[in-house]
């Protein structure tokens, strides 16, 4: 799952879930649930492939208020039957959800990017502007790191976001990017 931590911003999970629901068309089945402090939205595309394979994968968005900020996670996971949510609560809080293969990869990338845009806009509104990771802090987990570190010592996230590409000079926007977001050249540490 892709995880982002927004320091110093307390998102409104119910309002954010409502905003996220807007990006899904009638082709999606959507469910929301609350598991402890985490608000969860799942969306899966209805269709013949899912029915024929019997697999039940869904784009899952988790919003968790944490001390000093908000964590948002997005990824493909098993569709949860609401009757089994109590059993899943233990796994959610431990962060041990089982990721499924990228069933529906043809739509996942686009909808995931749309979801991140809605989330970033919500966070920016709550904060009164864009929220970059704190200096010396990982934008993924919020852990303190040494100056000049290329990767987080706690979660391994790429800390090169905000740096410039040696090839074209473009400022990098994606902390998990391995290639320049403008010219496509590999980023060096």
Image: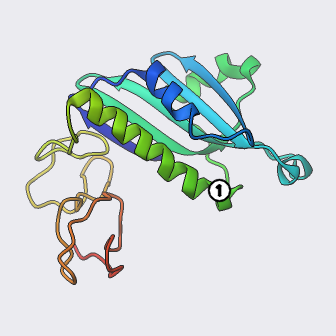
Residue at 79% across / 44% down in the picture?
Answer: 46
Residue at 58% across / 32% down in the picture?
Answer: 21
Left or right: where does residue 57 sit relative to residue 4?
right
Name which quarter of the figure residue 177 lies in.
Answer: bottom left
- Farthest residue to the right: give it: 52
Residue at 28% across / 59% down in the picture?
Answer: 173
- In which quadrant is the C terminus drawn? bottom left
Residue 14 vs 173, above or below: the answer is above
The percent position of residue 152, horizontal first and vertical second, equals: 25, 53
Give 151 or 75, whichever is nearer the viewer.
75
Query: Count of labels shown?
Result: 1
Crowding near the residue tagged with mark 1, few <14, some 14–19, many ≥20 C-alpha atoms within 10 Å: few
The percent position of residue 14, horizontal first and vertical second, equals: 47, 19
Give 43 or 72, whichever is nearer the viewer.
43
Q: Which residue is mark 1?
A: 107
Name which quarter of the figure residue 24 lies in.
Answer: top right
Left or right: where does residue 176 sit relative to residue 165?
right
Residue 73 vs 156, above or below: the answer is above
Residue at 36% across / 59% down in the picture?
Answer: 176
Left or right: where does residue 84 sit relative to residue 32?
right
The percent position of residue 112, horizontal first and vertical second, equals: 52, 50
Label 1, secondary structure: give it. helix
Give 16 or 148, whichever is nearer the viewer.
16
Q: Is residue 22 visible?
A: yes
Q: Is residue 96 visible?
A: no
């Amino acid at each position: 799952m892709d995880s982002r931590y927004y320091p110093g911003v307390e998102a409104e999970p119910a309002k954010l879930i409502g905003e996220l629901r807007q990006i899904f068309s009638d082709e999606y089945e959507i469910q929301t649930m609350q598991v402890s402090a985490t608000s969860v939205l799942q969306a899966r595309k209805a269709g013949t492939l899912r029915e024929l394979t019997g697999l039940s994968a869904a784009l899952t968005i988790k919003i968790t208020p944490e001390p000093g900020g908000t964590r948002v996670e997005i990824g493909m996971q098993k569709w949860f039957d609401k009757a089994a949510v109590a059993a899943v609560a233990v796994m959610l809080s431990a962060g041990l959800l089982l990721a499924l293969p990228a069933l529906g990869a043809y739509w996942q990338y686009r909808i995931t990017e749309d979801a991140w845009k809605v989330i970033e806009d919500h966070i920016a509104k709550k904060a009164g502007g864009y929220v970059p990771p704190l200096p010396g802090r990982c934008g993924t987990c919020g852990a303190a790191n040494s100056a000049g570190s290329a990767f987080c010592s706690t979660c391994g996230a790429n800390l090169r976001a905000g740096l410039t590409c040696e090839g074209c000079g473009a400022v990098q926007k994606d902390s998990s990017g391995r290639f320049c977001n403008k010219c496509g050249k590999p980023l060096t540490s």
